[in-house]
Amino acid sequence: MSEIKETLTQPITLTDGAVKQLQLIRDQQGLDPEHGLRVGVKGGGCSGFSYILGFDKPTDKDDTFEINGMKVLMEKSHAIYLLGIEIDWLNGLNNRGFSFNNPNASDTCGCGTSFSA
């Protein structure tokens, strides 16, 4: 089991709206406290990379953070693509879902879930 690291600089930001929605999802799934929010990237999507966002158990490849009361898991090798990202929850007429504001993205696609770096 990974230990939670204390850090002065959060690697990512979760808005209050995102945390509220993530807590709702976690509660609906009935997950045990060992699960954390996995934030990562994978190859694919229309711009080269897609975001990973879901609940998972920690692995040896992860750094674990506490961000706005949420246990966050991030694979160490993904930090270069995610450092400084803000994850928000949109609940409007035109958009509903998580949005990713990534300062490391050189280009993003129209769907907002794919980027290039």
Image (spheres, grey):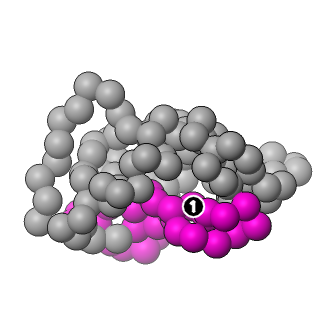
Q: Would residue 110 be visible to someone looking at this image? A: yes
Q: Residue at x 66, y 64 (%)?
A: 48
Q: Position of residue 87 (x, y in %)?
A: 56, 44
Q: Position of residue 76 (x, y in %)?
A: 30, 55
Label 1: which residue? Answer: 51
Q: Nearer the viewer, residue 95 or 101?
A: 101
Quadrant in the rendering for residue 73: bottom left
Q: Answer above or below: position of 18 versus 51.
A: above
Residue 95 left/right relative to 97: right
Q: From the image, which quarter does the N terminus lie in?
A: bottom left
* Three-letter code, disc 1: Tyr
Q: Which residues are magenta?
A: 26-55
Q: Position of residue 97 (x, y in %)?
A: 69, 56
Q: Nearer the viewer, residue 112 or 35?
A: 112
Q: Would residue 97 be visible to someone looking at this image? A: no
Quadrant in the rendering for residue 109: bottom right
Residue 79 left/right relative to 86: left
Q: Residue at x 41, y 56 (%)?
A: 78
